[in-house]
Image (cartoon, coloured by chain):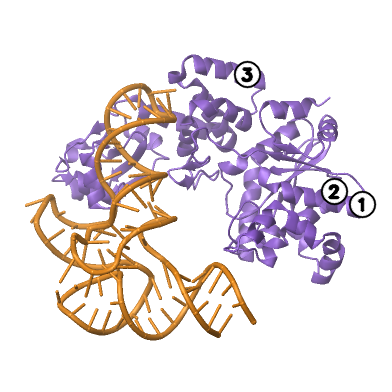
Chain colours: A purple, B orange
Amino acid sequence: MGRVLDSLKQRGMFSQVTNEAEVAKLLDTPGNAIYVGFDPTADSLHVGHMLPIMGLAMLQRAGHIPIALVGGATGMVGDPSGRSTERNLLTADEVRHNSECIRKQLMHFLDFSGSNAAIMENNADWTEKLTAIEWLRDVGKHFTINYMLAKESVKRRVEDRESGVSYTEFSYMILQANDFLQLFRRHNCRLQAGGSDQWGNITAGIDLIRRVTGAEAFGITFPLVTTSSGEKFGKSAGNAVWLDPARTSPYRFYQYWLQTEDADVEKFLGFFSFLPWEEIQAISAEHMAAPERRVGQRRLAEEVTRLVHGEAELQRAMNASKALFGGSLNGLEKRDLDDIFADVPSATMDRSDMATGIGIVDLLVKSGMCASNGEARRMVQGGGIYVNNERVGEPAATFGPDALLADSVIVLRSGKKNYRLVRFG
RNA sequence: GGUGGGGUUCCCGAGUGGUCAAAGGGGGCAGACUGUAAAUCUGUUGUCAAACGGCUUCGGAGGUUCAAAUCCUCCCCCCACCA
């Protein structure tokens, strides 16, 4: 009993369940529908969304039917959970566009064929049709204000005089509760999963199902992903790491995972790969025996990049990483360079700009590597700038045509890992 | 609507006429040490300039002054208490 739940527990993948014994039983009986909701606040998911997605995908592998609910309706309102300020409302067009993009990304993780094929739903389908009167009488009647005010997501905002909470966001939880009820009716879905900030919304749905139908439904939440050193998980240089390759290139995506701290490697392998726990243990043991070899990070980066971007993109990212962090760039063919730097940010400059030699400061600013001349100069003086992987220590340094690799590009680098390619056309 | 407090650089926050491009902390970036890790230490963090020195910035618009983040006027926004 509790095999599936135990394996999630082993990986550290859940923080709360409403009824552990019953959920354990339900998860050990294949064929149950389980739902996770995603709000279309942007046109791509990012790695911060990945844990619930992975959880859902793992449950599908255990024989269950995953339902990915895109919040075409709830996205119009805004979830106050875990937020201290009111959201800006999105337009209907934005929500529609975002919903469609997110739907496509979820297809990478879930299997939409077979006997337990994943199901995609959009809560706009049942929410938009409701009239205000129906809404208040059929759904609103089941909630007391007292109950809603007691929810953590709302409570904090009500008590905080600085921000407050609008009636709109206050109502969010009953919209989501109604989603659960609708999915229960349509797909006999009795379990909702979500991030730990979703607890209040999930339990609201469970209560609604009980009041309306008398049936018992359940909830399970995944933990908040944190890093050991307290860095924000899912951010790289202040930017979110997106699943959309147009927003975060596969190379950067791969690098993000490769740069994981030792202390997080095992945990992240458990969260973000489908590898069996025993294998993760073995990798982790090997890693800790010789951490400088970065066995764990490599495996993690490979697994996650393959899952999100596919084998071909993974190979490109790995090749690029090998070349960039491997040493000399001399002797590489133009074709290799193009391939290696396909994903690396690049700039194009006119060849005549450097015919007589271009100053390093100019080069850094024109290529977009540095924001101002002053910054560029400071970086060079501080020893943080490399051209073709060789340090430039002198702000007056200039580069002419003989600095071109394969007669066409210059590789700029600041610090250890920040590359930029300048093409001369 | 009334009364009081407040809006400063990426964030928090000091600064109440010149010595202010503005303390301190956080964050960011870079260096050293390393392993594309963590911790630690160091430097740096408006912009132009090699430098001297300019220029733009303290909610907005005006004004006083040789000189304004600092004083005055009007306006906008936030908060507290009262109604």
Numbered mark located on residue A184 in the image: 2
Q: Are marks 2 and 1 in contact (CB under 8 Å)?
A: yes
Q: Is residue A408 left or right of residue A167?
A: left
Q: Residue at x 77, y 28 (%)?
A: A4
Neighbour tally class for label 3: few under 14, some 14-19, many 20 plus, Cα within 10 Å: few
Q: Residue at x 66, y 62 (%)?
A: A76
Rendered-image quadrant of the N terminus of chain A = top right
For the residue pair A186 and A270, the one nearer the viewer reads as A270
User: Are labels 2 and 3 on one chain?
Assistant: yes
Task: Determine whether A33 is above or below A124 in the image.
Answer: above
For the residue pair A352 and A86, the one nearer the viewer reads as A86
Q: Secondary structure at mark 3?
A: helix
Chain letter of disc 1?
A
Q: Residue at x 83, y 29 (%)?
A: A28
Q: Is residue A107 left or right of residue A374?
A: right
The span from disc 1 to disc 3 (Cα, nearest Å) is 44 Å
Occupied quadrant, residue A380: top left
Residue to which mark 3 is pinned: A279
Neighbour tally class for label 2: few under 14, some 14-19, many 20 plus, Cα within 10 Å: many
Neighbour tally class for label 1: few under 14, some 14-19, many 20 plus, Cα within 10 Å: few
Horizontal and vertical percent position of residue A302: 53, 28
Chain letter of disc 3?
A
The mark that comes first in sequence, 2 or 1, is 2
Numbered mark located on residue A213 in the image: 1
Horizontal and vertical percent position of residue A143: 82, 59
Chain letter of disc 2?
A
